[in-house]
Image (tube, rainbow, N blue to C red):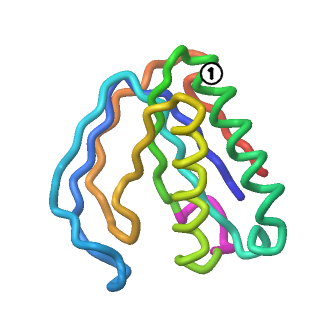
Amino acid sequence: MKLLMIYMNSFSYNPTIKTIDSMPEFTEQKSYKNIQAAFIQVEKEDEEKESAVKKKLLKNLKWIAGKNSTKKIILHSFAHLSESKADPEFTKSVFDNIEERLKNSGFEVEQTPFGYFLDLKVDAPGYSLARVFKDL
């Protein structure tokens, strides 16, 4: 799993092209303020070590949110951090599980529409822990 975490003063998206037919329809544009974004690439090999990868992902997201003094996290599937790609259904199940676990820990969590290309607007500050990359 590859994980790019970016703290954002503001983040918004607008769904443009649906790429996975089995996913629900999304047309709503959304915007957020002071949010920790997680750009996540679930890789094929993660399917064999699911429990360990989820544990590391959860730990990293809680850590970076704490460092950036936010309880708001948005999960974004970003299949451009690695050549290896997990099955889309597996990836979506990881996202759903992590969202639930973070919410159970007191975080406000959302996901960008899965299986879509999105227009993104990002305003990210320039300090050390505003952008962190991890290879889990």
Q: Amino acid at mark 1?
A: Leu
Secondary structure that dominates the magenta span: loop
Residue 5 or residue 102, whichever sits in front: 102
Q: Is residue 77 left or right of residue 30?
A: right
Q: Is residue 44 shown above or below 102?
A: below
Whether residue 76 appears in magenta in the rendering, the answer is no
Q: Position of residue 4 (x, y in %)?
A: 60, 44
Q: Report the residue marked by disc 1.
A: 129
Q: Specify the quadrant that holds the N terminus.
A: bottom right
Magenta-tinted stretch: 79-85
Q: Residue at x 60, y 45 (%)?
A: 101
> Closer to the camera, 111 or 13?
111
Q: Residue at x 45, y 29 (%)?
A: 72
In this view, 128 is above or below 135 = above
Mark 1 secondary-structure assignment:
helix
The spot of residue 29 in percent (x, y) is 18, 49
Residue located at (52% from left, 58% from top): 96
Task: In the rendered view, tell whether residue 3 sits above or below residue 107.
Answer: below
Q: Residue at x 21, y 53 (%)?
A: 14
